Amino acid sequence: MLTKSHGLGNDYLVADPAELPFAVTPERVRLLCDRHFGIGSDGLLTLETPLGVRIFNPDGSEAEKSGNGLRIFARWLYTTGRVTKRQFTIHTRAGGVAAEVHDGPDITLDMGRATFRSDLSELVVANQTLQVTALSVGNPHCVVFRGALDVTELHQLGPLIEHHPAFPNRTNVQFVHALDQANLELLIWERGAGETQASGSSSCAAVAAAHRAGFVESDVTAHMPGGELHIRIDPSGSLWLRGPVEEVATVKLSADLVRRLQALP
């Protein structure tokens, strides 16, 4: 049994590996996430004891952290009774993340402090030099500020930046336009997933980069194709992310799909 949920159109499957009739492998993740031959999603979240999570991209690779994924996982932990308090800590490859489940659809996460790369401010991509901000919020990001956003540019340059040699583990990419001191709009090319309707960690990275550049203050709304997330930078520099989660379905795998999954390595 799996649960499918989304955060502003960024959808994940959630599972307890003990309840699956197969081990989780990259090949099986790719099939589960395939929108034609599997269930379809932007990734898979699996429970690790105690209150830990593994975050799989749809290409089978693993992510250190995901703002939308962690909000979805927090809601799943609470809804399934695996936690009974509204405040708890989820353990990720990038460390612990404090979570709070609110009444209604919203979840708040402490995404931690951003760390900036001092060795990288320009990238040569497709015969043009881009001014970039490279940083980590537990996973890698590359922010490109623009006067206006163009989804065609995202598709042209996003994969080239993701796979640029400057990022040996690949990177998430954000094209960002500062609307005013409290609002950003962004388009997202997610590592291992491609264009994404919304991303919590990308929103945090964009806000951190824009705040450092003086484009925004400390309370910011990030506007994405899938909707809006709110990010607050506290006095210590921690990024607090708040946004909604919606459950889509509880999924019982068919015998045919289980057989195909079990046949994979």
Image (cartoon, rainbow, N blue to C red):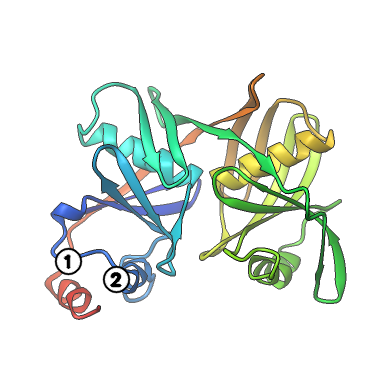
Query: Quick one: quadrant of the C terminus?
Result: bottom left
Instruction: From the viewer's perspective, tell me whether residue 230 is left or right of residue 74.
Output: right
**Which residue does the numbered mark 1 point to in the structure image?**
22
Q: Is residue 234 above or below residue 38?
A: above
Tell me the amino acid under the disc marked 1. Answer: Phe
Q: Nearer the viewer, residue 178 or 232?
A: 232
Residue plotted at (78% across, 32% down): 216
Q: Is residue 1 visible?
A: no
**Dividing the picture into quarters, in which one does residue 96 lie?**
top left
CB within 8 Å, label 1 to label 2:
yes
Q: Disc 1 or 2, which lies upstream in sequence? A: 1
Q: Is residue 78 visible?
A: yes
Query: Is the residue marked by circle 2 packed among few (<14), some (14-19), or many (20+) residues within 10 Å?
Result: many
Secondary structure of the residue carrying numbered label 2: helix
Residue plotted at (61% across, 66% down): 168
Query: Quick one: quadrant of the N terminus?
Result: bottom left
Residue plotted at (66% across, 41% down): 115
Query: How many numbered marks have been drawn onto this rendered protein structure?
Result: 2
Q: CA distance from mark 1 to mark 2?
A: 9 Å
Query: Is the residue marked by circle 1 packed among few (<14), some (14-19), or many (20+) residues within 10 Å?
Result: some
Image x and y of residue 207, in percent: 69, 38
Image x and y of residue 81, in percent: 20, 32
**Dividing the picture into quarters, in which one does residue 132 lie?**
bottom right
Q: Which mark is residue 28?
A: 2
Find the residue positioned furthest to the top.
235
Residue plotted at (64% across, 22% down): 236
Q: Nearer the viewer, residue 142 or 12?
A: 142
Q: Nearer the viewer, residue 92 or 247?
A: 92
Instruction: From the viewer's perspective, tell me whether residue 80 is left or right of residue 152.
Output: left
